Amino acid sequence: MDDSLSAPSAAGDPPAAGPPSPIAHPLAGPSGPSGPSGPHPLAGHGRSPLRIPVRVRAGFLIPAAVILLGIIIWPAVDSIWLSLHNHDGSKWVGLHNYKTLFSDQATLKALKNNVIWVVCAPTIACALGLMFALLSEKIRWSTAFKAVIFMPMAISFLAAGVIFELVYQQDPNQGVANAVAVGIHDTFAPSSKYPGAHPRTDTAKPAAAGSFTSVKTYTAGSVVQLPLVGIQAAKLPGKAAQAAAPSAAPAPDQIEGTVWLDIIYGGGGTPNHIDTGKKGMPGISVKAIDTATGKSAGSASAHNDGTFTIKGLKPGAGYALEIPASNFAQPYRGIQWLGPSLVTPAIIASYLWIWAGFAMVLIAAGLASIPRELQEAARVDGANERQIFRRITVPLLAPVLLVVLVTQIINVLKVFDLVYVIAPGSTLPDANVLAVHMWSVSFGGGQDQGLGSAIGVFLYILVLPAMYFNIRRLRTEKKEGR
Amino acid sequence: MSVTRPVAVPGQVPLGTRVAKRLTGGALYIIVLVVGVIWLIPTLGLFISSFRKASDITGSGWWTVFTHPAQLTFKDYTDVFSNKGIIQSLWNTVLITVPATALVVLLGSLAAYAFAWIDFRGRDWLFVVVVGLMVVPIQVALLPVAALYRNLHIFGSIVGVVLFHVGFGLPFAIYLLRNFFAAIPRELLEATRMEGGSEWTIFRKVIVPLGLPAIASLAIFQFLWVWNDLLVALVFSNAKTQPLTVALQSNMRQFGSNIDILAPGAFLSLSVPLVVFFAFQRYFVQGLMAGSVKG
Amino acid sequence: MGARSPRFLPAAIAVGLASGLALAGCSSSSSKPAAPGTSESSASSASSAASSSSSAGAGTALPDLSGKSIQVLAEWSGEEQKAFQKVMDAFHAKTHASISYQGAGDQTVTVLKSKLAGGGAPDVALVAQPGAIAQLAQAGQIKPLSDNVLTAIDANYAQGWKTLGTVNGKVYSIMFKAANKSTFWYNTAQFDQAGVQAPKTWDDFVKAAGTLSDAGITPVSVGGADGWTLTDWFENVYLSQAGPEMYDKLAHHQIKWTDPSVSKALTTLKQLFGNDKLMSGGKSGALQIDFNTSVTQTFTAPPKAAMVYEGDFAGSVITSTTKAKLGTDAKFFPFPAAGSLANFVVGGGDAALATNDNPATMAFIQFLASPEAAEAWASAGGFLSPDKNVPLSTYPDDTTKAEAQMLVQAGDNFRFDMSDQAPAGFGGTKGAGEWKDLQDFLNSGDVNAAAAQLEKDAAKETWQ
């Protein structure tokens, strides 16, 4: 059959012309490798589509058309109309809302995030879906595997949001992501003995990288008192004993001192004084820094009662005492998943968790439709597995992959629930996307239906590229098919 | 059925096996295991949380139950069921979901068939517009449709909720099915036409059986989306017609994380789709996923 | 507090949407707007037994209203609805009027407005948004309260509460159920461990925080991921420093946010917000902690902070999500005074208004303004009355007692939450306006930049 026969009335309207792709086998794409690509032997005898009565065509289309008109098309057109009006629709403002839109930093940020989403999420979702679909064909427990991957699709977005709020909790005792991060970190870098402890500011000052240096300079042969605060008495090691004062007269080449926790459980006591009830801090290391050279001249570790003795110093020389940072380093608290820099990737990850199952199911359905004969034929012709995958499977899957990709792109353009639920208020502006922004503007406080609608219309425009690809594909189908 | 289908040669090795042949068995299973665990852990966390008291949930991570099994309790579930309306709302959910799914599948496949195999003027442009409709956010339609429903006197009724879901389900349904239907071999359709079959016969005897994998996928997606919808039902249902999601929502406290209500709610909500799938496993899981339509 | 719980997206959408519906559907009349979770109940029968306690002579003198019926609209559902039922039962027992209730949750104002426009309006509504009440009063859609009601108010309330319900010189509403947002909660074990007492002034508070920090205890948990908690911090400091008159001016944007009084309050807050050691997780950590977590983490084992500021409702979070007991493990002190004003309360509440001046309508409001009505609910818990004649012994526990006492003592120094009075675009939107600006301030500590940004955002809105 030829063009002129099938679509006489559609001259000059190329996309509307002709019957659709008489593709030889299910899901054959533009580059379907083998199979009959010429006119089918039966084609000439087929009933022309022309002869299908209007009534029949209408019967197929009208029910869907009516519902689409009432539920989506009319509201969409209505939103275009609203976008040209002020906040409550009472006054015509022309393109004013669009001007506001593009001069607003928040919109631009949302647009930028949408671009990140569109570039990353659909492709990764497709890749994961393809990988999972192929993997599951190979393994024995494929049904269970597919059920596990698919399960997130069956959970509501609200629940999914809550699930990922749980996963991304900052506290490693609550959030599983940080529990893992901290677990891994601490395996390689164990935490310090006295995290968070620090001297009172009148005895020592912070030095580089979390260390502390004494305010005064001490000569060898003198005694030093180093009271620390900032950690709970209950967190001292069990061997810590009542702090003791250093001996009154150390040897001339030594500095003796006490490092103790200057806190009594329940309060009380005199600051910077070794009262009864204050304990030494065993194991803290103290360095003597030669004030002349700035180099370390010796170090010691505190005993159970907090006393220490630094030996081998030059009698009469001046030393500053340093308590190195290694004593105090705060425990690793994990990654701030929902902080300003990671919030968008973190939410995209939760999106992939949900939608990889969607891609997998559709791609598996596509794989299921691929006829085996083609692969068998190729194999007989001597093709290896890699060639079969690249030259036959992938091209045959291309239409399905495209469907998944386009659906995902559109889906991602209007992503809303996950961003709104997972992002904390403080980083919502960093994670903002157009659909969330639209909601904030028109419902969530702004109550500006006009501006909100303008963002909606902007979304319609963003979908045009995806529609363009579809038109191109329809045309290619036709060329291939004829 | 007069239709011949590509039939797999008995004893043939599945496609994926060949594709992934270079992966040795052990490595493959490790990958599958790691992926499976990553995918399972978030749900597992919520699942275990649904058996813990709110005070335990906020006090420690869910994994601590493995060392403190005494924390497990059914209290969260009994609390949910103590809400009298919950059974009615579960029934409402069924009343909404089943017709909304059936209608989308039916109307969607009819239209998709027309877009794939019946020629008419402006067809491709119309199709592209339908694709574009997928981008219309639900929020845009809430106000105008509410006004429409008020005039039709179906505001608050189940019909209204169903129609809204059908409307927003159709563009994806048409897009997905049209692409699958268009790939069905032309000669199969022509053969039926030559035998004098009407378009309706072709649709029933050729398109539906061959498009089954896609139709089944669509049915599952649509079913789940409608089943889990909160926003649409929140707006268009009322106290008597509200589905489970809305009923659970109204249980929530104004303050507090509400995980003790949400978690059992999520699994209560999940249980019905799971039961449906296991009951129809032959059709869904094997038929759709493992690809038994192949032969 | 209805406007302020946008944690759950759908509820928030419903609110936003419903107000949109109200805009779009002003002309339509018959059908009810979206009111999910609406529930109805009635006290016309089967309720006499419950109310025998209140018939002990004294009480308010109310007419016999047999055969009359009243419809009441409020936000309460669940437990709160049951408790309010007791109040209605008591009224029924006294007057024999039949009385029915509809709960509309977050959408009370929307439902009220659409019913006023479309007919079938309730006789009495309890509304939490003072701005909405003023609007309705100016539009002439609600009626000034009758002389009998005013007499009851004068007898039972401090003058300030009457002023709160006054629009253009006439009293239109009276608060029945109040919320106290000047309560500062602390973990008693942590305070004991450091030997710290509940502070009375801001200086004491900063000092106590330092002592706690030295003792290795993180002093304060700030829920900075939710912007509204930060607005509450600011309001308490501002009210105490600048005084009620300035507070009212700022609440209506009659002075600018660049006013020195604002900078002073921000500088005060910075003593806490600017010091990483004093907040759980430091600045960046605080910005990741939402309100719920900020409360629970203060009372879990091990606790991550010694104290947390938020209103009386934080108490319900403590009881529902931690093992801590109110009154022993968890106590509160009044928000420390940052300025000369000491007995103050920032808060909110549901105020009763009348849509007509029928005797039955006014009688019910008169009843709500009496101690009897408050007592009927107070004994059930979860209720604070601003009524000074409600004996404290009515409240079920010491914590509630103390909260109620604060409220009554504050008298004329009670102020409605400022951000709740502001346009929602400024005072009630996640990631925008005042919420966002104070989060940025918490992060940067830049007082002048914060004040300038607040003014810039405030200037965008239309203020009443």
Image: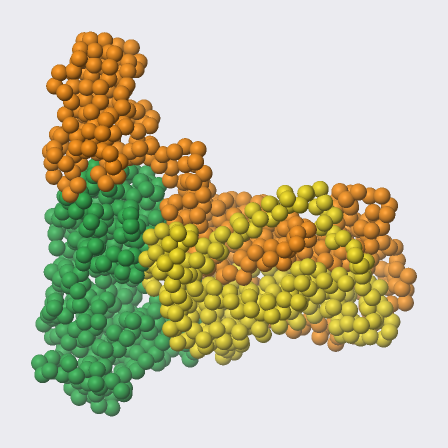
Residue B110 sits in quarter: bottom right
Residue C317 place in picture, x, y as percent: 29, 59
Residue C249, visible in the rendered structure: no
Q: Which hue is chain C drawn in? A: green
Residue A345, visible in the rendered structure: yes
Quadrant occupied by the N terminus of chain A? bottom right
Q: Which hue is chain A drawn in? A: orange
Along the viewing direction, whichever of C164 and C323 lies nearer the viewer: C323
Task: Residue at 19%, 51% (x, y): give it.
Answer: C188
Residue A87 sits in quarter: bottom left
Quadrant occupied by the C terminus of chain A? bottom right
Residue B294 place in picture, x, y as percent: 75, 61
Q: Which hue is chain B drawn in? A: yellow
Residue A311 place in picture, x, y as percent: 24, 14
Residue A470 place in picture, x, y as percent: 69, 54
Residue A149 sits in quarter: bottom right
